[in-house]
Amino acid sequence: MNATTTETTLQGAPLTSDLAHALLAGHAIVTVRNTRTGNRFTYRIRQCDAMPELFFVAVLTGSENEQDFTYLGTIRKEHYTHGRKSRIAHTAQSAQAFAWFWTHRNILPACVEVWHTGRCLRCGRTLTVPESIASGLGSECSKKVSHHTRAAA
Ligand SMILES: [Zn+2]
């Protein structure tokens, strides 16, 4: 632990006990980022309609932030299990990162941030990249907006 560790903590962190509870609210989408390694994954935790104690966990694997989720596993009675039918191996980094995150969600180290999604202020799309959430613009829209600003100046 040094001074830089606390400085790198952005607005998505630390995960409060309230937010840990909110992960099972029904339609959670969160980006988990390790600021030390730079790794990040976006997970969706969705409640099963027929069995409310069951939750499906998926990881974002494509560029469409609302659709491109791949099934990862299930949470039942707060216990996470990697899905046997998942197309993602339980040894994959995204799978191991979620298993670790779920176990440590109440005691996360300062280098792990949890971000809510945001909406792009230009096109309204869901934002999952921490820098985009912080700036309010997706990367493409960010270029267009700064272009506008420069052109107008
Ligand atoms: Zn946009």
Image (cartoon, grey):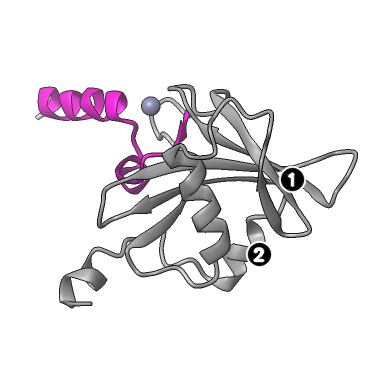
| Among the 4 quarters of the image, the one containing residue 109 | bottom left
Image vertical order of residue 137 relative to residue 38, above or below: above
* Ligand 1 lies in quarter: top left
Q: Using a 10 Å C-alpha cutoff, classify the residue at mark 2 as few (fewer than 14 neighbours), some (14 to 19) or many (20 or more).
A: few
For the question of whether residue 11 can be seen, the reply is: no
Residue 50 in picture, x, y percent from top left: 90, 39
Quarter of the image containing the C terminus?
top left
Residue occupying image coordinates x 38% and y 60%: 112
* Circle 1 or circle 2, nearest the eye: 1
The label number, if any, that marks residue 55 in the structure image: 1
Q: CA distance from mark 1 to mark 2?
A: 13 Å
Does the segment drawn in magenta span residue 134?
A: yes
Identify the amino acid type marked 1. Answer: Phe
Span colored in magenta: 125-152
Q: Using a 10 Å C-alpha cutoff, classify the residue at mark 1 as few (fewer than 14 neighbours), some (14 to 19) or many (20 or more).
A: many
Image vertical order of residue 38 relative to residue 128, above or below: below
Identify the amino acid type marked 2. Answer: His
Which circle's residue, 1 or 2, is located before the other in the chain? Answer: 2
**Secondary-structure class at tag 1:** strand
Residue 133 in picture, x, y percent from top left: 38, 44
Residue 45 in picture, x, y percent from top left: 65, 44
**Secondary-structure class at tag 2:** helix
Residue occupying image coordinates x 28% and y 29%: 139
